[in-house]
Structure formats: C-alpha cells, structure tokens
Image (cartoon, grey):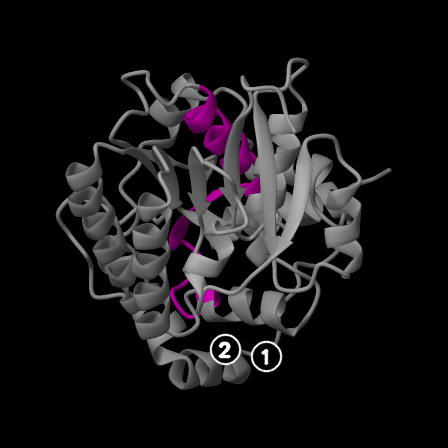
C-alpha cells in the first residue's frame, strides 16, 4: 500500500498523448505526490506495459461504457483526469458525463477535464462545432455535479495540436483542408506534452486560485499556413506534408461535422486565447519551431 500522503488519481487516455504527458510530468517531480492509476483498454499493449514499470503507477483495465467498474478498482480516489474521444459526439458527451458521475460517486475531489478553447467567450459559447459543443456540455455537467458534492475542477482549453501534423494520410489531409482557407489563414497550436505539464500543475496546485474551479486556455503559437510551411521547410529541409487539393476538399465534405464546420469556424471566429499573455503564465509553451526541433517526428537526434 502507498504511504497515506499519496493521493490516488485516475488518468484516462493514459497510453495516449495527453494522459501519457500528464503521467510523465507527475513522475518528473522528485517527491512523489500521487499514486497514478493508468486507465487502458488493453493492459498488455507495449505502452501499457511500459507504464506499469514506472514507480507509483498501476495500470488498470476498463472502458468508458462501464465507469463504475473502473472506479471500483481504486480505493478512495482523490483525482480524475478526464479526456474524451470526439469521433462520435453523442457518445463522447454521454460517456464524459457518466465518468464524471462515477468519479464523484467514488469520492473524487478534483477533476481535470480537457475541453477546448471556443473563442473569445469560451465560458458561454458552445460554438457550432459538434465536438466543441459536446465538451462545453460536459463542462457544464461537471460544474453542476461538483456543486452537489463539494468537489473542485479545472478545465483545460487547448487549441489545435501540433501533433495533427504527421507524415501520413491524416496529417497530409489536415494541411490540405487548411489550404482551402488560404495561405494567410491562421490557426493557433499547442503541444500535447505542454498540456500534460499544465494538467500536472492543476493536480499539484488544485487548491490555488489559478486552478480551483477555473478554466485555463492553452496555446503556444499563432501561425498562418504560409508561416507554418516556411518554418517547417527551414527546420527540416523537407516539403510540408500535404496531399492533393481535391483530397482536402473531399475530406472537408466527407468529414463535415469533424473538419468542415471547424475549418469554416477558424475563418469566421477562431480560437480566442492570447498567445503572448498565455506564454507569460506558462513560459514553457512551445512555438511551432521549437516543437519541430524537440518533439516532432522530424527532430534531429
């Protein structure tokens, strides 16, 4: 059994980018503060096995369709890192709310939920983007349920992920869909590892004013597609991964709810976080150039 001073937290998406980054950040502290329960569907996967070898980390198996069974594996959980899958927004919302209910029923005292920045009025505007609106409703549900139990929460509201840029069909498609908006169109980005660092702070400093029942927007850069392409080619010496324009148009049409509506919103509204002010609060937030050099698949070893 861990020492009484170690608080137990459940990390969903533990083998994914955000959950993995959170765990790495918590483990980087010299004095252990938490016993981490890493949630995965497949505890035999290579990434899950790697986590199980870490100190103060226990890998547990579970599925969002049965949240009570997940929390039943954790004696007296204190915290819950909630990250949801936006592929099916109706399922995302239902599962996100069910996990919140199960967490609070199990006695969780602090929830960190990764939502998204929704423009200049993220507290009130769900937006027309389905997978933004689902996270907005999960936020509202957390607020309502936490009032009933006295639990606290922190909402992380990141912008687009640098990790959307990959040298495969999805990454090339992302650039091609962006290209339809024009070379001067701008998007704000953030590193998922940096999200994990802030999530760790939100648990470590849960009682502080900055995090207690607050939302934190996160962005490391604000770039046009033209700047994005130039930086990429300067840093890597390669062409920016991209597919044919007709493929981009096809993706924007076929994935209208996931991509089409969102990329139109980028031109009409866009993310609201002030990057310069954000980096005063979190100086470690990486810009695109630094991400390419330090974290991307194109970094030079």
Tell me the SS state at disc 1: loop
- Decide: is 115 above or below 278: below
Compared to 168, does 13 lie above or below? above
CA gap between label 1 and label 2 equals: 7 Å
Image point (47%, 35%), residue name = 220
**Which quarter of the rendered picture does the C terminus lie within?**
top right
Q: Is residue 120 visible?
A: no
What is the count of numbered marks? Answer: 2
On screen, residue 268 versus residue 179, left or right, reads left
Q: Position of residue 60 (x, y in %)?
A: 63, 52
Q: Which mark is residue 244?
A: 1
Is 256 situated left or right of 193 in this image? left
Q: Nearer the viewer, residue 189 or 47?
A: 47
- Label 2, secondary structure: give it: helix
Kindly indicate whether the residue at mark 2 contacts the one at mark 1 (C-beta within 8 angstroms).
yes
Residue found 30% across the figure and 71% down from its top: 261
Q: Residue 248's mark?
A: 2
Magenta stretch: includes residue 115: no
Rendered position, 250 above or below 219: below
The 10 Å Cα crowd at callout 2, few under 14, some 14 to 19, many 20 or more, is: many
Residue occupying image coordinates x 72% and y 41%: 235
Q: Which mark is residue 68?
A: none
* Residue interval drawn in magenta: 178-204
Residue at horizontal 61 percent and vertical 19 percent from the top: 3
Question: In front: 89, or 4?
Answer: 4
Quadrant for residue 86, please give it.
Answer: bottom left
At which x and y percent is residue 216? 33, 33
Q: Residues within 10 Å of mark 1 (few under 14, many from 20)?
A: few
Q: Residue furthest right?
A: 301
């Amino acid at each position: 059994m861990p020492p009484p001073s170690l608080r137990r937290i459940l990390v969903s998406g533990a083998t994914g980018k955000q959950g993995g980054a959170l765990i790495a950040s918590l483990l980087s502290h010299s004095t252990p503060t938490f016993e981490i329960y890493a949630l995965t569907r497949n505890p035999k996967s290579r990434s899950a096995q790697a986590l199980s070898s870490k100190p103060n980390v226990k890998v547990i198996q579970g599925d969002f369709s049965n949240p009570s069974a997940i929390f039943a594996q954790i004696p007296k959980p204190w915290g819950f890192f909630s990250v949801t899958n936006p592929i099916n927004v109706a399922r995302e919302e239902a599962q996100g709310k069910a996990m919140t209910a199960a967490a609070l029923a199990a006695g969780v005292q602090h929830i960190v939920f990764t939502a998204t920045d929704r423009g200049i009025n993220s507290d009130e505007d769900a937006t027309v983007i389905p997978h933004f609106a689902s996270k907005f409703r999960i936020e509202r549900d957390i607020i309502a349920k936490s009032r009933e139990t006295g639990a606290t929460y922190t909402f992380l509201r990141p912008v687009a992920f640098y990790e959307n840029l990959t040298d495969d069909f999805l990454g090339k498609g992302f650039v091609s869909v962006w290209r339809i908006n024009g070379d001067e169109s701008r998007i704000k980005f953030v590193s998922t590892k940096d999200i994990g660092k802030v999530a760790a702070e939100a648990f470590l400093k849960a009682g502080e004013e900055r995090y207690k029942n607050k939302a934190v927007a996160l962005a490391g850069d604000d770039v046009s597609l033209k700047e994005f392409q130039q930086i990429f080619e300067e840093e890597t010496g390669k062409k920016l991964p991209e597919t044919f324009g007709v493929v981009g148009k096809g993706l924007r049409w076929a994935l209208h709810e996931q991509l089409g509506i969102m990329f139109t919103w980028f031109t009409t509204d866009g993310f609201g976080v002030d990057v310069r002010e954000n980096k005063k609060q979190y100086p470690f937030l990486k810009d695109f150039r630094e991400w390419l050099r330090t974290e991307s698949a194109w970094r030079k070893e």
